[in-house]
Image (spheres, coloured by chain):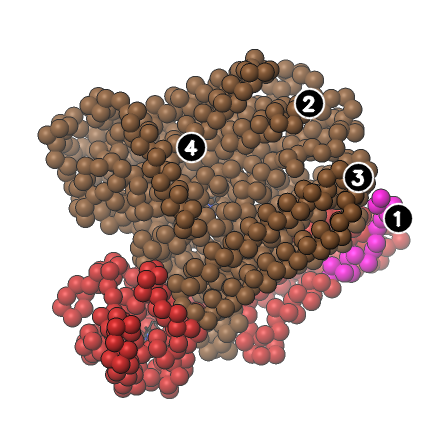
Chain colours: A brown, B red
Amino acid sequence: MVSCLMKKRTAGKAVFLFVLSVMFFPAFLNTGFSASFSPAAAYAGTDAVSPVAHEETYTHPPAPKLKAQDYPIVMGINSRVFVWMAAQLHLWFAAFVLAVPIFVFIIEAVGMATKDERYDKMAYEFIKVSLTAYSVTALIGGLLAFSLFVFYPDLMRYMTRLFGQTMLLYALLFFAESATLYIYYYGWHAMERGFSKWAHLTIGLLLNAVGTTLMFLANAWVTFMMSPSGVDAGGVFDGNIWHVIHNHLWNPINLHRFVANIAFGGSIVGAYAAYRFLSARSDSDRAHYDWMGYTANLIAISALLPLPFAGYWLTAEIYAYSQQMGITLMGGAFAWLFITQAVIIGALFLSANYYLWCGMERSPGAYRYTKYIKYIAAVIVVCFLVWFTPHTLILKPWELKALGGQYHPFLGPLGIMPAKNTAVNIMLIFTFLSFLLYRRANKIAVVSWAPLGRAAQAAVFAGAILNIVFLGVYYGYFTNTVYKVASSVPQVASTLTVIAACMVIDFFMFKGAKDVGELRWGGIPQRSQYALFLLAVSFTWLMGLMGFIRSSIRQHWHVYSVMRDASVNAYTLTIASAAKTVSAAAIIFMAMVIFIFWLSALSSKKQDKPLPLGSDAKNPKEGGGIR
Amino acid sequence: MKKPDGANPAKLLWFVVIVFIAYVIFKSPGWFMNKPIPGSLIMMYMFFAVVAALLVMTSTDESTQGLFAPIKALVEDPSKKIIRNAVFVIAPIVGALITYNQIKPGFDAPVELRATHPAPPTIMKAYDKTFNLATLENPFRKLQTENPEKFKEAVKEGGAVYFKNCFFCHGDKLDGKGHFAQGFNPLPLPFQGKDTIAQLQESFVFWRISTGGPGLPKEATPWLSAMPVWHTFLSEDEVWKAILFIYDYTDNAPRSWVSANSKKDG
Ligand code: HEM
């Protein structure tokens, strides 16, 4: 992990040096950009330093010390909730529109490699869904920026002074993103053959590069507010923009968001497929959307698997940056929201697995494997219970008396990290097992060494599980904390080894395998589609909740330990009111998404193109989905 | 191929049995060992046990039909009129009883959601100076590697501090069960086990000892903690040595982020 971290850092640096080297007119930027926001400054009613007054001779001012009166009140609107809602909606849409091109790019490449046109068509349909969302993203982004400058003028003035260059770059990248996205989408059919297909794929790559850089920039602003660097204790800028960007939490958030966005995007497209599946009138439609849902779920799961690790890295870095933030997060005021998070993540895993199990109904050969489902489920549930068992229990007085203390003799050890890490790794391995069984549900291996291959796979599983449990128990409970944290790395390595080794064995073992029967795309039971909805809703909710937690562990700071939040709203919400606000935002988002789905469905009806799976949809070719 | 005969009505029974077994498992630490799993947690555990059982049992068409066939029959089959009516009377009554039991007022003190380990402040004041908790370290910790003899001595002195001041509450085995312990709410905390002070940095422990109950931040309300404010009784060095002692005696090591000063001492 450490080495990959280092690589990431240097890679990030390289990208940024490149990006910085193409920056234009720094002079124009400081004047032009901040001046355009001066109406907001005027709003503050304070005579601010003229934002135009700096450049060469400029000495960097410290962060302002604000009073409650410095925050404008506009029409009695609760500024915190307003900005929060706008930011959250913007993030959801942005996550979605950044994620879709990533997997569309991959699917398009797979389509080119396999020469199977259905991939191309599905990729096109995915990107179409994200196109409407793109305009909404931009719209809400505008609203967010506007509301930030209206409600928090002094904070934004301080932030613009520091980040002005990157904000301009952000704006430029936004135009680049729009341009490439539109070329990518509208050029899809025009650039379908030969060399121009390669050119098209390259545009897709460019689109993703721009999009990811865009997000990394925004992440720098966010993480600066949590773990400021490049400024002194009073907030005076040391003059090096890279120091400010490359703050302590920047890369952990970059990684976590990058991966989480893909999982989130996959789940939203999955919900789209489920929506179309349930409303489909013809078998060919059902087959197509079943396949699309399957692929989307696969994307979501693949990105889900590494997420807990990215999450732990992020948390470990938060803890390492500030014990205060770390404890607030995990043991203090937010501990119970963290339990809620764990519960939602469990729900994610269960619904993703359920979808795979239901998916076996598509294959006539599945009866050979369905008997294992209950064991997989049992293991996942046990792990999951460990995963969300809190360390600080809610005890009734008689329970407290019986236990004789806050800590439970059996549950206490389950409440700390080594137990959680062990549980989550095993949960991942068994989710992977569901997938493995799903893949072979319809196949009969013909290679002579198949029994040996299966035995080898079983051995890899058993070995990894033993190793994970051993590491968790031994290093977790019999050594000190440094080892506790360090032991999570070989645990993850075991999990990854299982996944890699089994995929390799599978690849050779099922080469030229016989099919038991025809795969029945569209034959998945309807109830499975609700698992896809649940996946999307859980993801949305989770993101909202975690975003709230992440930003709130700063507590009464705009910029942690540098610039105080003096507004009347600078208090920590109760769990209930935070959850309500996040839920309200989630419902608004869902409503907007449904509207977008409806629009996309409408436009595809109008175009009335032949359906992707063709006329023999009852028996679409086997082997759909990314294998 | 799937077996066409499908529905196996025993499924519903299985479902009930599985849920019941899960319930017994979660309850048994309380029943048999007097270490109850808190009710709030059992609710969550049961919720997921039920959901998982449902998911497994509806993962194939065949077993879904089996699971729901008896319920369907109960509602639709004319020959089951008597059972149906009985169920329709009994079910709401059971529901009402459960609800009544949940909301009926009792004599128990309300449950508190208290943070046992609240977030420490960034800086704290004691001994007429200011400590920065982010960088604060135990001045004696380095002796562990540099001068083990001296370290042992310091630990021993810490032990003396502990038994003169702390063991009344935190216990002679450091398990939180001192003579006075039962008199306090919140209870004095134990230091034994890998899930107690092993999770904390020494600066945190220093903060908790020197500022005691009154030094707790808002989220650790209510402020009933009986932990005394030790910086008014003990010297700075005494507190640090007591910290050495409580880690050493319980075979724990403080949380730390630098692997350089980690010594495997498990
Ligand atoms: C399967 C496991 C996990 C899933 C599915 C997951 C999912 C997510 C998602 C979707 C987001 C929002 C990302 C975004 O803002 O774009 C998020 C953010 C976050 N997650 Fe996780 N996560 C997982 C594990 C964890 C773990 C184990 C931790 C820490 C212990 C964690 C800590 C956080 C934090 C602090 C944020 C807020 C970061 C931000 O504001 O973007 N996550 N997570």
Residue A316, magenta (yes or no): no
Tell me whether marks 2 and 1 sit on the same chain.
no
Q: Amino acid at mark 4?
A: Thr
Along the line of sight, the residue nearer the viewer: B131 or B185: B131
Beta carbon of the mark 4 residue lies under 8 A of ligand 1: no
Q: CA distance from mark 3 to mark 2?
A: 26 Å
Task: Tell me the amino acid under the disc marked 1.
Answer: Asp
Q: Position of residue A311 (x, y in %)?
A: 45, 49
**Image quadrant in which the C terminus of chain A is located:** top right
Q: Tell me whether marks 2 and 4 sit on the same chain.
A: yes
* Residue B17: numbered disc: none
Gap between marks 2 and 4, in whole Å? 30 Å
Residue B169, position in %: x, y? 35, 82
Residue designated by label 1: B5
Residue, disc 4: A212
Q: Residue furthest top?
A: A190
Q: For the residues marked 3 and 4, what is the alpha-carbon distance in whole angstroms?
A: 42 Å
Q: Are marks 3 and 1 on the same chain?
A: no
State the extent of the magenta-drawn residues as a range: B1-16
**Three-letter amino acid code at the position of disc 2:** Pro
- Residue underneath mark 2: A612
